[in-house]
Amino acid sequence: MPTALRFASTLSAVLLAAFTLALPAQAQTAPATADPMPGLKAVMQQLGRHMQAVAGAISAEDWAEVARLAPQIAEHPEPPLTEKVRVLTWLGTDAVKFRGLDQQVGAAANAMGDAARRGDGGAVIDAFAKVQQACLACHQGYRASFRQHFK
């Protein structure tokens, strides 16, 4: 299935779920110290650990470790459905750009893994830089307003 069609299908399913599921938990007041997006936070923390491990493996020229970690970055877990619905609703039409950045991360991480399996250190570093650039673009584009909105 083409990426745009798969994204549209996923978005439709998420929006349908948002409108058909009763979310009584949102009606309750959460403690002020509770993390509003614990699933997303866990995903991002895991990605951060994987990226740090890749950086260490690159420094050691441990291409097998880079190859092992790359698919974990490319195919990272997604947050729970309720969190995805909240994020997609907040993003609105920007969801396409947001998803595009995630796809750039995935493509670059897959390229990094391929290069690591070939033992091509230069290509690994180039692909790692592309992963980092896509992460940075997303963080600079969304993190501050996301934190403000979901605090």
Image (cartoon, rainbow, N blue to C red):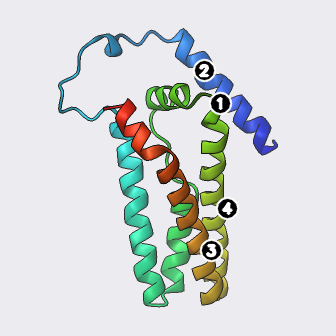
Query: Image quarter for residue 82?
Result: top left
Find out whether the residues at labels 1 and 2 contact each other: C-beta distance under 8 Å.
no
Task: Give, as a three-letter code, the residue at label 2.
Answer: Leu
Q: Position of residue 87 (x, y in %)?
A: 49, 32
Considering the numbered disc 2 on the image, is that residue within a helix, a strand or a loop?
helix
Q: Earlier along the polypeptide chain: callout 1 or callout 2?
A: 2
* Quadrant in which the C terminus appears: top left
The answer to which of 4 and 20 lies nearer the viewer is 4
Q: For the residue labelled by badge 1, is the local secondary structure a helix, a strand or a loop?
A: helix
Query: In which quadrant of the rendered view does residue 34 lie?
Result: top left
Whole-Å distance between the Cαs marked 1 and 2?
13 Å
The image shows residue 72 at horizontal and vertical percentages of 51, 61
Mark 2, residue position: 15
Q: Which residue is mark 4?
A: 107
Residue at 57%, 73% in the rendered image: 129
The amino acid type found where label 3 is placed reads Ala
| Numbered circle sitting on residue 65 | none
Residue at (74%, 37%) from the top-left corner?
6
Query: Are the residues at dot 4 and dot 3 in contact (C-beta closer than 8 Å)?
Result: no
Q: Residues within 10 Å of mark 4 (few under 14, many from 20)?
A: some
List the residue tagged with mark 1: 93
Q: How many marks?
A: 4
Q: In the picture shown, does residue 14 fall above or below 59?
A: above
Q: Residue at x 32, y 15 (%)?
A: 25
Q: Secondary structure at mark 3?
A: helix
Image position, residue 120 (x, y; %): 65, 88
Query: Mark 3 sits on what residue?
Result: 127
